[in-house]
Image (cartoon, rainbow, N blue to C red):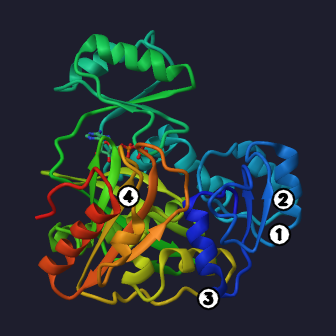
Amino acid sequence: MIGGGQLARMMGEAAESVNVELHVLATSMDDCAVTTCHEASVGDAKDASALAQFGASVDVVTFDHELVDLEQIAELEKSGVVVRPSSNSLRYSVNKAFQRQEFKNAGLPVPKFLVVSSIEDSALNAFLDELGTEPVVKASHGGYDGRGVLFPENRDETFSAIKKLSKDGPVLIEERLELEGEVAQLIARDVNGKLAVYPLVTTVQRDGMCIEVRYPSHASDDFDTQAKLLGEQIAQLMDVVGIFAIEFFVTEQGLVINEVALRPHNSGHWTIEGTETSQFQNHLLAVSGQELGAIETTGNYAVMVNIIGGDAAPTPERAAAIEDVHVHDYAKEWKPDRKLGHITVVGHLQMQTLMTGWAAATAYGTTVVEEPL
Ligand code: ADP
């Protein structure tokens, strides 16, 4: 697995149960996956020789983040290394502009958008005038957790946002939708194209970062069906092997696709305790060429709350002392605004599940949980 962050860490915890030995390419031996994986090498994910050496030492290469160079990954494939998901699939998550354009071409619901490389673009002013409000401005490469996503309030700020983000490549400018909420669809696809479609969940964001996930989703049954159908179509379009997530905006007009991630996703952490086979296990099963596992839920309700560094150091042991609370501490150095861990509660009663999750997150010391009810 290229990358040694918390996704790789949780993948390491899942590996033995699916008969996989996980070898990570970490940026340093301090990366949080190093203690859970079978083997770790240190190297830069964008260094061609480090990649070649790593690729030669494993059966399959997969990813814990999308901060990779697609040309280098394609070279790795050409040299005979098995890469799952492939560089062609990965392009959808590495390049948001490509993703938007391909989805639009396929007739999938996406926000109105324009890709520009500078404020000089001849189509820019007409596009901005056509929108009712100022747009959302996004870097097409390299953003995550809301970094690389700007919400300008007036035209001057829009131009400054484009100037700022265009220093690093093309910029995606899109219509700012009025959101009724956000939901996420997680799907695993095996090497034969067989799917495991997890239940739809609601995600709660603050400052562009996911802070909480709830199963079942608050969205109507119609949205469940729509998300599943769109998910099946997208799985085939991207020809993905492994787990992937689709983040949807819930709008008056129905579901609109925000983005896809071709890796385990924050919206799927609850599956570790909440479904028979977690997203981490199913990802490893898929990329190692095995059959997918069952995804029946283990309770009627689940809540996952991210622990994000605040002013004081976190206290995971206080959360762990609460009954029915599963604590995942990523063993990361504590820093404000950094994801340090998460808690999950699975239960049969909605109110009790949410209240226990809220109590656990507060005990852990997160500063960002909103009133859950
Ligand atoms: P990242 O890739 O960093 O997670 P996203 O593109 O998912 O960034 O944006 C982060 C959050 O910003 C979204 O979850 C949503 O709350 C808000 N957002 C992004 N795009 C739009 C949009 N077009 N309209 C309204 N809100 C948006």
- Name the foreground residue: 366 vs 194: 366
Instruction: Kindly state the secondary structure of the residue where label 3 is placed.
Output: helix
Residue shown at 87% from the left, 53% from the top: 52
Kindly identify which numbered label has been placed on residue 17.
Answer: 3
Residue shown at 48% from the left, 85% from the top: 277
**Sequence-wise first label, 2 or 3:** 3
Q: Nearer the viewer, mark 2 or mark 4?
A: 4
The amino acid beneath tag 2 is Phe
- Name the foreground residue: 111 vs 299: 299
Q: For the residue carrying disc 4, how many other residues have a C-alpha within 10 Å: few (<14), some (14-19), or many (20+)?
A: many
* Place of residue 161 in the rendered image (x, y in percent of width and height, measured from the top left): 39, 20
**Sequence-wise first label, 1 or 4:** 1
The amino acid beneath tag 3 is Ser
The amino acid beneath tag 1 is Val
* Place of residue 355 in the rendered image (x, y in percent of width and height, measured from the top left): 17, 72
Location of mark 1 (residue): 58
Location of mark 4 (residue): 307
Q: Are marks 1 and 4 in contact (CB under 8 Å)?
A: no
Quadrant containing ligand 1 reads top left
**Sequence-wise first label, 4 or 3:** 3
Give the Cα separation between the discs numbered 2 and 4.
32 Å
Location of mark 2 (residue): 54
